[in-house]
Amino acid sequence: MLKKKYKVAKKKVIEKIHTQGKSFMTPYFVLKSHATSEDTLSRFGITISSKVHKSAVKRNRIKRIIFGYLAKQHNNITPNLDIMIIVSRKAINQATQQVERKAILQSLEFALTKTHILNN
């Protein structure tokens, strides 16, 4: 699990990412990133609307999967970024199967690599 200091929590920061951040879309996610002026490690936030799925259990499961992946890759992530991951309905539907979970994480890795956030 990702530590609290690596998570975006303040509403002002989240709104700034949404309005001023650069976007990248995949079938499962919309990735928004915004450079910070502070000399810090990158921070992440995940948004899953209740319109995507009514069950909080399923929404939290997706968050745990994504945060778990980000915790493993945190050393390879470019510093000084605030990143929001907005999860689509398709990701919720696919997360229950193990094979599809891999597809979701591959899609996330592709998005992070394509936007030069993840350095392999």
Image: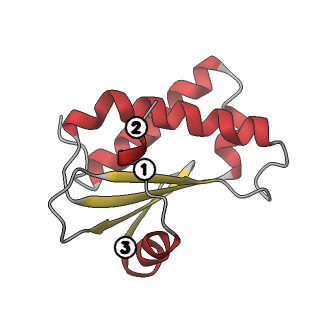
| Relative to 24, residue 61 above or below | above
Q: Secondary structure beneath disc 2?
A: loop
Identify residue type, mark 3: Gly
- Label placed on residue 7: 1
Where is 106 relative to 116, above or below?
above
Please state which of residues 48 and 111 is positioned toward the viewer in this rendering: 48
| Callout 2 crowding tier (Cα within 10 Å): few <14, some 14–19, many ≥20 | few
Q: CA distance from mark 3 to mark 1?
A: 16 Å
Nearest the eye: 79 or 113: 79
Badge 3 or badge 2: first in the primary sequence: 2
What label does residue 3 carry, if any? 2
Q: CA distance from mark 3 to mark 2?
A: 23 Å
Q: Picture quarter containing residue 86?
A: bottom right
Instruction: Tell me the mark number nearer the camera, choosing from 3 and 1.
Output: 1
Q: Residue at x 45, y 40 (%)?
A: 107
Left or right of 50? Residue 44 is left
Give the labeled residue for mark 3.
21
Q: Residue at x 19, y 52 (%)?
A: 79
Residue type indicated by callout 1: Lys
Q: Quadrant of the C terminus?
A: top left
Is the C-beta separation of discs 1 and 2 under 8 Å?
yes
SS type, badge 1? loop
Q: Give neighbour class at mark 3: few <14, some 14-19, many 20+ (Cα, 10 Å).
A: some
